[in-house]
Each structure stands twice: as structure tokens, then as C-alpha cells.
């Protein structure tokens, strides 16, 4: 569709995209809302359902979601690390007006955000690991 | 480093054919830039530019829309509201100085603390960010103006009208008095008009905030100077982008909350009334989904100012540019996962508290990173202890103290102890004073030479700084103890002998010292400086583009739009200011006598278009006044005048769009200098208007999502949603409404393609048919709600169904107007097969409408039957 093509041109030049830096934090956000919503709904409606023996079902589900989220973030972080390509030129400032610096800058920012998002997902998982009951 | 990228044009990147309509060499070579401009050409260009950008004389000055004027008015107005809110705080401190005081009554005290909080948040902190950004962002970006000057003006006038209305209620003893977060059931059950004034007045100002966010985001993405790739943007621009995005996701939930709230106050729909299935906690959720990100919406722009002042003071580039971008973006995201920490004592399940406690601790990481980056920059640079840096340093020290108490209150059991005590009052003032007030004063001191071409006094500044900082700590440090010793916030007086007496007296004494400090600053800000010499052009030795400003002042923004190859062009790019002044760069002239600015691509800032921006106008003011009427009349339950006012506001906006946006230019491309020729008209994703629509609709969808969240919230929170014997929305009519809505969507897409195919009149007919389908969709939605006899006052379930219906119907109404606008534009030649920006923008609106209509049908007619 014409609109999509124009959009693509507008947002991404070469292999860089501004959106990509927001993916990892978005995964954190979705995971966060899902965990909160899942626990709230589950505790309100089916508080005694269990999985894997006698563990509350919502705890298992949240931990499962965390594994998935960390997997996605890890993959994004790996791609961003490759885009940053730090070990090639040891550049972490990217101050030049070149395609390479812009490309590596976006990779660098996306990588750092992936690390932060992973920490965020782990933080969100802790309550589900440590708190065993709804109330 | 001189023009690192100057050289042969790099190979065309993958996925990119040459930009449509852009011809000529780019980027410019050093030889091209070194070519001199004849003096008489330069003079003639300057005269034309000056003529085009001059402000209207005399009383017509008020019709100005230029960013420098609007920004100045906006920031001074916000500062004025801050002083008023500060006076309220002083009266409250006087009342609390001694136990059992009767200086003011409990009722008046309630009004004062409510208005102090509301005004500081809604009339000072957020508008101040918008005002300062409107004022300085174009200068950072070497742009002539913001992309939508009249939208800024509209936002400003909305802000003035709403602010005066809300603050004015204090004079009639009718001000809101239920606290700045307006918790129901107190606020929904109480009589009087205070709560209505708060709701409608502030909703109106929220509209202005969203308008500013749209303007600023588009400004950062599309109005950067050629060559300023995303890795070269000033950090301030990064922060503006993040904060603009946050406003889009934070304000709409509050607007949705206000919508429900006013339906309850005005029409007795029981959203927050537990007796009829409602739940006051929904308001708390919606308010704090807004309220917590708002703290960061206030804090990040002030940190952004620090990110501009610190490198200048250190005389070197910022350390950790990527890390600061990380922390801005990361804080922006995580700040949305904190809202429930304001609700730790409401009896939510502990597991819910756990998630929010965890996120509240996690947000410390990105917040801390940026502070360390500043400290690192100062450590490795050669620091000049300028007055602005002093303010910034003092602010960050105070903010850090507030951050540490924040870590404490983020732990739920600690919060249970200090909730609603003076400990929290101390915490929030440490974060807001340190994170906003002091850095902003530092920023004003720093940018003052840019704003006024004069300097502020260093002596007065030092007095002001030390009085404010010392007074602040005398006021608020003891409050931690007052709170731990059990004094609740928001009490108008207290008995003696509880150990609170001397602490309160100390705080009151401190508040007077703060007031003295702020007054000295205010005096220095406005005292006449007619006899003082003009400032140097770059008094602090900054490296960013705003210091290429003209002294004495010129209204054109930049003389010519430079080609940028560095984060600090004034430090790194040889002769850049000289060449800008000479008109050696882009857009040095205004041959056609129009105000113009350059539009560039999002990532690499390649020139794409010359955008004609609008000039002085009264219509924006009229639109703001009528919008004000539409919000203010309902406060007094005067609905017919409100409807008339709303209709007139819509007419004003249509007139404004029709007469001044997407005008078809005389020629399709324009030579912008250095041999480069770019289009004068673009449509779709390359046009700023399309971006404005896209961003607005993102915010609008967030508000809609908040209403849908309400449905799920009621379902989880209670057992009677929907009630066992409830009547449901008629699914057949609902389905028909959905189909008609989607037909209208299809119509605009078909109309756009037909028009592109060279047949504007059939396209107009299709758009008209779409409008008819839209009108039928409204009728079908109303029938689907009315037929089963859903009574919105009986229970929250029918009320929620109606609320979703009303939302969708109102949006369909707007969509119909847009379709008719397109049809008219095609018929009267305002849009043609090659000039079709309105068609693209309206299609985009209808993409969002298709989503809204579909979700509404599913959530009202189908989902409840399965619950």
C-alpha cells in the first residue's frame, strides 16, 4: 500500500530505525501490564487454581511470561549489540555526521535500553517469585 | 573538526530511492559554502525576511503567533500562576505557624491547598515546559518557527482562559476544595461548583497540553536543520521527544477520567458510586496513570535544561550521550509502571503492590544514570561556576535527597506508615523543587541573554539562589520529622503539645525565606534593563545553535538554516555563524513574501520540503474563546450555550484550516539556496500535518483505551458487572453500526485513490457518501443503546455502555465533518489529484476510527454477554 511504503521511507534509512530503540522497553511495558492484569484478574476470579503441583497458577504464568519476555529482549539486545558493533572500532560516543555513527548510535541506545528492560522484567518477576498468595 | 561529512554524496542507502522532487547537490561542499554573498544581495534578503517576520504593530501585537512571542507570553503567564500558587502556600504556612490558629477557616484552607497543588501542577509545571520548549526549541534546531504556529497560539489562549477561570474561582469562595487529585466520593457527592470548575477548567488546559505535545514532537522529528541526524540532536530535543510522547499517553487517561467524572456530576451516571455498582478506585487508577508519569513529565524537561547548561559550563561535550538518551527513554517508559504506589493504602492485593514497588525501585536506575553523566562531564571538563550551573547543581542536590526518600516510600510497608503525612509532603517538594523549580530558574538565567538580549544580575542571582536553597531546606527538611511524628497532611490546624509546634514554626519561617528568594528572582527577571548594554552574542560560550541568535533581536529565528555536522556546531564547525549571518546556507530569503521553514527527514534530516507557516491571526483566539465556552458553561449547567459555543469553536477551526493550511503553492518546487531545490507541497507521511494527526490520534486512542480499561476494571473489581438480569446492548443494531462505520472508512480510502487517479469530483461524491454512512452509523449506535432500554443512571453497567457509545458517536461526528471537508476541498479545488494532503490526514483519522468502532461493537454488544 502506498501509505505503508511512504511510512517505511519516512522512519527508516538504510538499516536504522528510530522505532527499534523502543521495542525492548515496550516488551517490558507489555510484560508489566500483563503481569499486573493477570494477577489482578486471577486473584479476583480464580484464586485457588494451581499449576505444577500446588503453586498458584498465576505465579507460574507470570514466570513463564518473564522467560518469554527476557528471550525477546535478549534477542533484541543481541541484534542491537551487533548494530553497535563496539568491538570493531571501540566507539561509544558516535559524534560524527556519518551514516556509520548514526547507525551505531541507534544500536548502542537500543542495546542499553534492552539491558534496562531486562532488569525491569526481572524486577517485575520478583514479586511473583517471592509472594505466594494473592492478599 | 571541520565539516567531516562534506565530500561526495554517499551512495544512496538501501530502501531509498532519491527523494521525490528534491534536486541538486546535497550535502553542500566546502567550496560551495566558502563562496561569498554580494553585500547588496544580502541586504535585500535581510529586508525581505525582516518584512515577512515582523510582528503586527500596536494592539494587533496580540494576534502574533510567532514562537518567540507565544513562548514569552506562555512562560510569563505560567510564572504568574506560580507566584499566585506560592502566595496560597504562604497563607497556609502562616495558618500552620502556631497550633489552634484561626487566620483562615477550614473551608478556605481546603480551597487553598487544592488550588496550590492544582495550579502548581497544571498551570505552572507542565505549561512551563511547553512554554520554554516553544520558546527555545526552534533555536536549538535552527528552525524559523514551530511547524504549527497557530496551534501554539490556540494552546496558549486556551491555557490563559482556563487558568484565569480556575484561579478566579478563589475570589468567589467557590474554588475546588477536595484536594488536587479530587478523589470521589467526596468530590462527586459534595455540592457547589468547585469540583466542576476543577474538572472542566483543567480538562480544557489538558487539551492545550496535548496541542503543545503534538507541536513539539513534530518539531523535533521534522524541523531539524539539514544534516542533524538523530545522533547529533541536542539532548534537549531528545527529552522533548520523550516528554511529548509521555504527555500523549499520560494525559488522555485523565481526560477519560474527567469524562466519566463529569457524566456522574452532571447527569448522575454512577461510575464512582458503590451503591450502584460503581467504584471510586477507578478514578484513583485513571488519575494516577496520569499523575505519576506527570511527575516525570515535569522533571525530564528540567533535566534537559541541565543537559544543555552542564556541557557549556564544563567547556566540553557531554559525557555519555547514548547513556542520557537511554535514561530519558527508559525513565519515560518505566514511569508508567509506578502509578499504584500512590494507592498502597487502598487495600489492593499485596501482589499488585509488589509489581509497582518493584517498578518504583527500578526507575531509580535510569534517573540515576543521567545525574552520573552530568557529574562525569563536570569532572572531566574545566568548570566555570556560572550562575546557571549553581542553580542546576543546587537543584540536583535537592532532587537527590527527594529521590532517596522516594526509594523509601516506594517500599509498601514504609509507605503505610507515612502515607498522607507531612513526610510525603516533604518528599514531593524535594523532588519537585529540586527536579523542576531550581533547574528551570537556572535555565531561565542561562537563556535570558537569548530571550531578551540582556543579562540578569549575578549579584541578585546569588542572593536569590542562597535564600531559596537555604529557605527551602528550613521549610521542608523538618517536615520529614513532622510527618514521622504523625502530623497528617491537609489539616487546617492542629492542637499544641504534640511536638509539632516548633517544627511547624520553623517551616513557616523557612517559607518566608523561600518567598524572598523567589521574589528577588522575579524582580531581576522583569526589572527594566533599558540602560544596560546588550549582551554578547554567546555569553556563556555555548556550542549549540541557539547562541547564533541575532543581537539586537531579529524576528526571523535564523538568518539562514545551517548544514550541521556536529553536536556542538558552534564549537566544531568553522565559520558557521559567519556563514549563517551571510545567508550562505539554506532559505536565506523570502522572495514570495511568505513565512517559511525547512522540513527534513526523521532519521538523517535530509531536506524534504519548504513549509509555509502561518502568520498572525485572530481566528485562533476566537477558537480558543469558544472552546473555553464549551467547557466553562457546563460548570454552571448551562448546556445550550455550551453547545452553541462548541459549534462556533468547530466553525472557527474549520475556517482556520481552510484558509491557512495545505495551501496550493504557485510553483511546485523552490530553490532554497546552495543549488538545492525542494518541493513546496507534500502530502501523506512526508507532511507535518499528517504527523500532527497521527500523534493526536495516538493520544485520543489512549483515552479510548482508558474507557475500555474501565469495563475490565469493573468486571474484575465487582461481582455484579454486568448484573445478572441486565439488559444488553442490541447486537444486531450494533453490528450494523459497526458495518456502517467501516463503510465510511472504506469510503475515504476509495475517495483518496480515486482522486489520485485524476477524478476529484467522483472522489468528492464518495467522500460525501462516506459522511452519510457515518451519520447512519451514529443513528444505529443510538438505536442499539436505546432499544433494550439501558438506563445509565440505574447502574454502572448501562452507564459504561452509554459512555463508550457517546465517545464513539462524538468521534464519528468529527469524522463526518472531516469527510465533508474533504468533499468540499475537492469540489472547490482546495485539494486536487496532486495536492491531496487533507485526504491523507482524514484517511489516517478514519484508520483510528475503524479501530474505535470495531472495539466499541465488540466491547458493548458481544463481550458482556460472555462475562
Image (cartoon, rainbow, N blue to C red):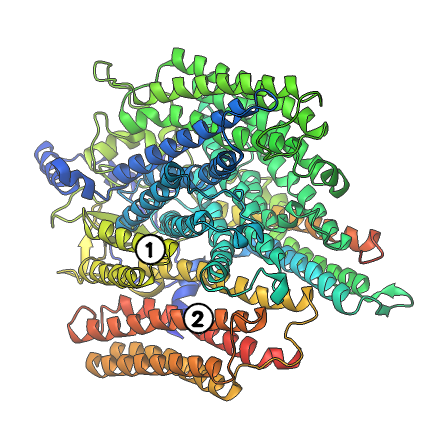
Mark drawn on residue B777: none
Residue at the spot 37% in from the left edge and 39% down from the top edge:
B172
Residue B493, percent from left and from top: 59, 28
Q: Secondary structure at mark 1?
A: helix
Residue A43 in which image quadrant: bottom right
Q: CA distance from mark 2 to mark 1?
A: 20 Å
Check the residue under mark 2 and report the chain it is in. Answer: B
Residue B711, percent from left and from top: 59, 68
> Within 10 angstroms of label 2, few (less than 14), some, or many (20 or more) residues?
some
Residue B305, percent from left and from top: 45, 32
Check the residue under mark 1 and report the chain it is in. Answer: B
Q: Which residue is mark 2?
A: B806
Residue at the spot 55% in from the left edge and 72% down from the top edge:
B794
Above or below, B430 relative to A113: above
In this rendering, does residue A108 appear at all?
no
Q: Secondary structure at mark 2?
A: helix
In this rendering, does residue B433 appear at all?
yes
Q: Residue furthest top?
A: B459
Q: If the image is split into quadrants, where does the C terminus of chain B sit?
A: bottom right
Residue at the spot 20% in from the left edge and 40% down from the top edge:
B62
Above or below, B236 relative to B659: above
Q: Which residue is mark 1?
A: B633
User: In front here: B670 or A43?
Assistant: A43
Q: Residue furthest bottom?
A: B732
Do circles 2 and 1 both sit on a common chain?
yes
Residue B198, percent from left and from top: 44, 47
Q: If the image is split into quadrants, where does the N terminus of chain B sit?
A: top left
User: In front here: B412 or A9?
Assistant: B412
> Within 10 angstroms of label 1, few (less than 14), some, or many (20 or more) residues?
some
Give the mark nearest the N terminus, 2 or 1: 1
Amino acid at each position: 500500500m502506498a501509505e505503508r511504503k511512504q511510512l517505511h521511507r519516512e522512519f527508516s534509512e538504510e538499516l536504522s530505525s528510530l522505532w527499534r530503540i523502543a521495542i525492548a522497553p515496550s516488551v517490558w511495558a507489555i510484560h508489566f501490564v500483563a503481569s499486573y492484569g493477570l494477577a489482578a484478574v486471577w486473584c479476583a476470579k480464580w484464586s485457588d487454581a494451581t499449576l505444577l503441583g500446588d503453586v498458584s497458577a498465576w505465579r507460574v504464568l507470570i514466570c513463564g511470561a518473564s522467560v518469554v519476555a527476557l528471550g525477546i529482549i535478549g534477542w533484541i539486545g543481541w541484534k542491537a549489540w551487533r548494530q553497535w558493533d563496539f568491538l570493531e572500532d571501540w566507539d561509544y560516543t558516535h559524534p560524527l555526521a556519518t551514516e556509520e555513527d548514526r547507525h551505531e548510535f541507534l544500536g548502542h541506545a537500543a542495546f542499553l535500553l534492552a539491558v534496562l528492560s531486562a532488569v525491569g522484567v526481572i524486577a517485575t518477576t520478583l514479586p511473583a517469585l517471592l509472594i505466594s498468595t494473592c492478599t | 573538526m571541520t565539516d567531516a561529512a562534506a565530500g561526495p554524496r554517499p551512495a544512496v542507502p538501501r530502501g531509498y530511492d532519491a527523494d521525490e522532487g528534491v534536486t541538486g547537490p546535497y550535502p553542500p561542499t566546502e567550496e560551495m559554502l566558502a563562496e561569498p554573498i554580494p553585500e547588496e544581495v544580502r541586504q535585500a534578503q535581510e529586508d525581505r525576511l525582516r518584512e515577512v517576520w515582523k510582528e503586527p504593530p500596536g494592539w494587533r501585537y496580540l494576534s502574533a503567533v510567532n514562537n518567540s512571542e507565544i513562548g514569552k507570553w506562555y512562560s510569563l503567564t505560567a510564572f504568574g500562576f506560580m507566584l499566585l500558587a506560592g502566595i496560597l502556600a504562604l497563607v497556609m504556612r502562616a495558618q500552620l505557624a502556631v497550633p489552634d490558629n484561626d487566620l483562615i477557616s477550614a473551608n478556605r484552607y481546603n480551597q487553598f491547598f487544592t488550588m496550590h497543588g492544582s495550579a502548581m501542577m497544571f498551570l505552572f509545571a507542565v505549561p512551563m515546559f511547553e512554554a520554554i520548549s516553544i520558546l527555545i526549541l526552534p533555536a536549538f534546531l535552527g528552525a524559523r518557527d514551530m511547524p504549527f504556529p497557530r496551534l501554539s497560539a490556540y494552546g496558549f489562549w486556551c491555557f490563559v482562559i482556563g487558568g484565569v477561570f480556575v484561579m478566579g474561582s478563589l475570589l468567589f469562595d467557590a474554588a475546588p476544595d477536595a484536594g488536587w487529585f479530587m478523589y470521589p466520593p467526596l468530590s462527586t457527592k459534595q455540592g457547589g461548583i468547585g469540583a466542576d470548575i476543577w474538572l472542566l477548567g483543567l480538562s480544557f488546559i489538558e487539551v492545550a497540553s496535548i496541542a503543545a505535545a503534538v507541536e513539539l514532537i513534530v518539531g523535533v522529528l521534522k524541523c531539524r536543520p539539514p544534516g542533524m541526524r538523530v545522533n547529533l540532536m541536542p539532548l534537549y530535543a531528545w527529552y522533548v521527544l520523550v516528554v511529548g510522547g509521555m504527555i500523549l499517553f499520560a494525559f488522555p487517561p485523565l481526560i477519560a477520567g474527567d469524562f466519566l467524572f463529569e457524566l456522574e456530576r452532571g447527569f448522575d451516571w454512577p461510575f464512582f458510586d458503590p451503591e450502584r455498582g460503581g467504584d471510586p478506585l477507578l478514578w484513583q487508577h485513571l488519575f494516577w496513570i496520569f499523575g505519576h508519569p506527570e511527575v516525570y513529565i515535569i522533571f525530564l524537561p528540567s533535566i534537559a535544561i541541565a543537559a544543555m547548561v552542564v556541557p557549556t559550563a564544563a567547556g566540553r561535550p557531554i559525557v555519555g550521550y547514548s547513556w542520557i538518551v537511554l535514561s530519558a527513554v527508559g525513565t519515560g517508559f518505566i514511569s508508567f509502571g509506578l502509578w499504584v504506589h500512590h494507592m498502597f493504602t487502598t487495600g489492593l492485593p499485596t501482589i499488585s503492590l509488589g509489581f509497582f514497588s518493584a517498578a518504583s525501585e527500578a526507575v531509580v536506575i535510569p534517573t540515576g544514570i543521567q545525574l552520573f553523566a552530568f557529574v562525569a562531564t563536570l569532572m572531566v571538563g574545566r568548570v566555570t561556576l556560572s550562575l546557571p550551573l549553581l542553580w542546576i547543581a543546587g537543584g540536583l542536590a535537592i532532587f537527590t535527597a527527594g529521590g532517596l526518600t522516594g526509594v523509601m516510600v516506594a517500599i509498601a510497608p514504609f509507605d503505610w506508615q507515612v502515607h498522607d503525612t507531612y513526610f510525603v509532603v516533604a518528599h514531593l517538594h524535594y523532588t519537585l523543587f529540586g527536579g523542576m523549580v531550581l533547574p528551570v530558574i537556572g535555565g531561565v538565567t542561562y537563556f535570558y541573554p537569548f530571550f531578551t538580549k540582556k543579562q540578569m544580575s549575578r549579584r541578585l542571582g546569588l542572593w536569590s539562589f542562597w535564600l531559596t536553597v537555604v529557605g527551602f531546606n528550613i521549610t521542608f527538611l523538618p517536615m520529614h520529622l513532622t510527618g514521622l511524628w504523625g502530623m497528617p497532611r491537609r489539616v487546617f490546624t492542629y492542637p499544641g503539645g504534640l511536638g509539632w509546634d516548633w517544627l511547624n514554626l520553623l517551616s513557616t519561617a523557612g517559607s518566608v525565606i523561600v518567598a524572598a528568594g523567589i521574589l528577588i528572582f522575579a524582580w531581576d527577571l522583569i526589572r527594566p534593563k533599558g540602560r544596560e548594554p546588550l549582551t554578547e552574542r554567546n555569553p556563556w560560550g555555548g556550542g549549540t545553535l541557539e547562541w547564533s541568535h541575532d543581537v539586537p533581536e531579529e524576528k526571523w529565528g535564523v538568518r539562514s538554516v545551517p548544514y550541521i555536522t556536529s553536536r556542538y556546531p558552534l564549537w566544531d564547525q568553522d565559520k558557521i555563524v559567519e556563514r549563517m549571518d551571510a545567508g550562505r546556507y539554506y532559505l536565506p530569503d523570502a522572495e514570495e513574501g511568505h513565512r517559511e521553514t525547512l522540513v527534513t527527514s526523521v532519521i538523517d534530516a535530509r531536506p524534504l520540503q519548504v513549509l509555509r507557516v502561518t502568520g498572525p491571526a485572530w481566528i485562533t483566539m476566537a477558537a480558543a474563546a469558544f472552546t473555553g465556552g464549551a467547557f466553562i458553561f457546563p460548570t454552571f449547567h448551562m448546556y445550550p450555550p455550551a453547545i452553541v459555543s462548541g459549534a462556533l469553536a468547530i466553525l472557527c477551526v474549520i475556517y482556520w484550516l481552510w484558509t491557512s493550511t495545505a495551501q496550493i503553492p504557485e510553483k511546485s518546487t523552490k530553490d532554497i539556496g546552495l543549488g538545492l531545490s525542494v518541493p513546496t507541497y507534500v502530502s501523506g507521511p512526508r507532511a507535518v500535518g499528517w504527523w500532527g494527526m497521527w500523534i493526536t490520534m495516538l493520544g485520543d486512542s489512549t483515552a479510548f483505551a482508558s474507557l475500555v480499561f474501565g469495563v475490565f476494571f469493573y468486571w474484575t473489581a465487582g461481582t455484579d458487572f454486568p448484573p445478572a438480569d441486565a439488559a444488553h446492548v442490541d447486537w444486531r443494531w450494533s453490528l450494523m453500526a459497526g458495518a456502517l462505520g467501516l463503510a465510511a472508512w472504506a469510503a475515504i480510502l476509495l475517495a483518496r485513490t480515486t482522486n489520485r487517479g485524476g477524478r476529484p469530483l467522483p472522489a468528492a461524491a464518495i467522500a460525501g457518501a462516506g459522511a452519510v454512512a457515518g451519520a447512519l452509523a451514529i443513528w444505529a449506535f443510538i438505536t442499539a443503546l436505546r432499544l433494550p432500554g439501558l438506563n445509565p443512571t440505574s447502574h454502572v453497567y448501562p452507564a459504561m455502555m452509554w459512555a463508550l457509545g457517546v465517545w464513539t458517536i462524538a468521534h464519528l461526528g468529527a469524522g463526518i465533518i472531516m469527510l465533508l471537508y474533504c468533499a468540499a476541498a475537492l469540489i472547490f479545488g482546495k485539494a486536487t489529484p496532486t495536492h491531496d494532503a487533507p485526504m491523507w490526514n482524514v484517511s489516517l483519522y478514519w484508520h483510528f476510527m475503524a479501530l474505535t468502532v470495531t472495539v466499541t461493537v465488540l466491547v458493548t454488544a458481544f463481550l458482556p454477554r460472555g462475562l
